[in-house]
Image (cartoon, rainbow, N blue to C red):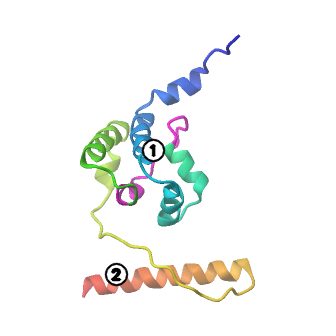
Amino acid sequence: MTEPASPVKDSVLESPVADYKRILQAVLELRPSGLRQRLAEAIGKNRSFISQITNPAYPTPIPVQYLDHIFEICHFSSQHRAAFLAAYRRAHPRRLSLLKHHERTRRVTLAVPDLGDDARNQRLDEFLTEYAERLAHLLLEG
């Protein structure tokens, strides 16, 4: 005997958010393994967050500030990108307009000493990130 489908889960799978997640999921299936980890590293999140934002069964929307990273890392075709953006616009009519044009970014990896304390290591990481952002801002202005 099969269990009846959950109305909550069914409504999530039929939502506008699920529509663009299905497109992203299709793109991910065309790419080699390890892409989810690369995406997690690029946006500074853990892999479970990537699972939530790529699975149509979860209602978690994809934050607009991650779209450029997703398009770049997942190598969206122009057709997939257009379909994704159309579905994203239907799901979040005003969200794309809130995204200000910003310069492309790239990730740089630094080797720094382990300070032997998670809190101190985190402070060092935050300092270096803030320093790089401020320096880049100054260079872009000048």
Secondary structure state at the residue bearing disc 2: helix
What residue lies at 29% left-to-right and 70% top-to-bottom? 103
| Foreground residue among 76 and 140 | 76
Give coordinates of residue 142: x percent, y percent.
24, 88
Q: Tell me the residue that label 1 is attached to.
A: 29
Mark drawn on residue 84: none
| Amino acid at circle 2 | His
Q: Quadrant of residue 122?
A: bottom right
Instruction: Give the residues in magenta.
Output: 55-72
| 5 left or right, relative to 19 | right
Q: Is residue 39 in the magenta section?
A: no
Q: Tell me the residue that label 2 is attached to.
A: 137
Q: Quadrant of the N terminus?
A: top right
> How packed is label 1: few (under 14 Cα within 10 Å), some, or many (20 or more)?
few
| Foreground residue among 110 and 127 | 110
Q: CA distance from mark 1 to mark 2?
A: 36 Å
Give coordinates of residue 111: x percent, y percent.
57, 86
What residue lies at 61% left-to-right and 52% top-to-bottom? 48
What residue lies at 51% left-to-right and 30% top-to-bottom? 12
For the image shown, how many numbered marks are present on the structure? 2
| Amino acid at circle 1 | Glu
Give coordinates of residue 137: x percent, y percent.
34, 81
| 101 left or right, relative to 49 | left
- Asked if residue 87 is positioned above or below residue 64 in the image, the reply reads above
- Asked if residue 65 is positioned above or below residue 121 in the image, the reply reads above
Secondary structure state at the residue bearing disc 1: helix
**Which mark is in front, 1 or 2?**
1
Q: Is residue 62 in the magenta section?
A: yes
